[in-house]
Image (spheres, helix red, strand yellow):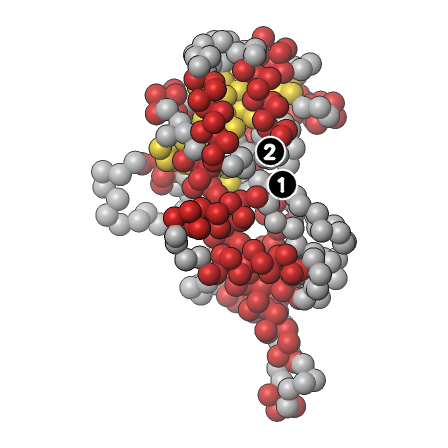
Amino acid sequence: MQLGLIGLGRMGANIARRLMRAGHHCVVYDRSGDAVRAVVADGALAAADPRDLVGKLDRPRAVWVMLPAGSVTEAAVSQLAGFLEPGDAVIDGGNSFWKDDVRRAAALTEKGLHYLDVGTSGGVWGLERGYCMMIGGDRTVVDRLDPIFAALAPGPGDAPRTPNREGRDPRAERGYLHTGPTGSGHFVKMIHNGIEYGLMQAYAEGFDILKNAASDALPAEHRFDFDLADIAEVWRRGSVITSWLLDLTAAALAESPALDDFPGHVQDSGEGRWTLIAAIEEAVPAEVLSAALYARFRSRRHHTFAEKILSAMRKGFGGHVEPPSADLEGEETR
């Protein structure tokens, strides 16, 4: 199939590469000429601007927007709507707020255009590992673009099959799923990222307790000088808390046991906050996820080893480099 792709950052460029490896054709655009040239070198067709990109696609067109949530994505979708024709589709693969998706889809529907919101997880490792995708929008359009999603998805891999899944959507076992109408894809991805905050915080606090087991404030006979890298490694091997986040933690600790290169200033993206807004609107208690978000706020005033662990995990899965100081709000896609 043919796909237009706008935004060739940490994930966008590798999405294009993974698709081309599967035999699909990509027309790409980014404000950075270097980013475009790098993907063109791997087989993509360059576009001079969004209008040119649309002109190089066959109908019905599909354009994947992989940009930071907010005004940048808003502008790109609005611009594309002026160039596309009825039957064409816009795919937002970033981390947009799901209510924005509902609004954008309604505006595009008036022009005869389709809009899919695709929550995309995989970070900088997606080229090799594949991307887990949560897809909202019209089922007919999702099915038409299934070859694109199937190529990007990780596939079943070596994970054992879950019992009693007979009769369910087989795409979930391959790492992608049509979650429902417009907005549902990014809603599910929002909760995914909220849970991620909680998991990361649990690991971070646990390793902080282990590190401080050698504190001089403890009686000498109660002190333990643990090798955190080895503990992370042994937990990866058969324990009930094994995960990719633990894999990344083990790698970071093996490289730098004190995590000296990480300042401990931990940014948050919109999804953690939006998850709590959804919890409030639904009157659902979310104590762990709330505490995890507030811990990130606190990290910008006072840093602990736990925050260094969080920074290490964020760099591992998404290539995020925390600023040394300043209370900055960032956008991220995982």
Left or right: residue 250 compared with residue 137: right
Left or right: residue 168 compared with residue 207: left
The residue lying at 61 percent from left, 23 percent from top is: 75
> Label 2 to label 1, Cα distance in Å?
9 Å
Relative depth, front residue between 234 and 283: 283
Q: Is residue 1 visible?
A: no
Residue for badge 1: 331
Q: Is residue 238 above or below residue 315?
A: below
Residue for badge 2: 70
Badge 2: residue crowd in 10 Å (few <14, some 14–19, many ≥20): some
Q: Is residue 175 above or below residue 41?
A: below
The residue lying at 53 percent from left, 20 percent from top is: 63
- Amino acid type for the residue under numbered disc 1: Glu
- Amino acid type for the residue under numbered disc 2: Gly
Q: Is residue 159 above or below residue 83?
A: below
Q: Quadrant of the C terminus?
A: top right
Q: Position of residue 208 (x, y in %)?
A: 61, 70
Q: Position of residue 105 (x, y in %)?
A: 45, 23
Secondary structure beneath dot 1 equals loop
State yes or no: discs 2 and 1 in contact (Cβ < 8 Å).
Answer: yes
Badge 1: residue crowd in 10 Å (few <14, some 14–19, many ≥20): some
Task: Indicate which disc, 2 or 1, sits on the residue closer to the N terminus.
Answer: 2
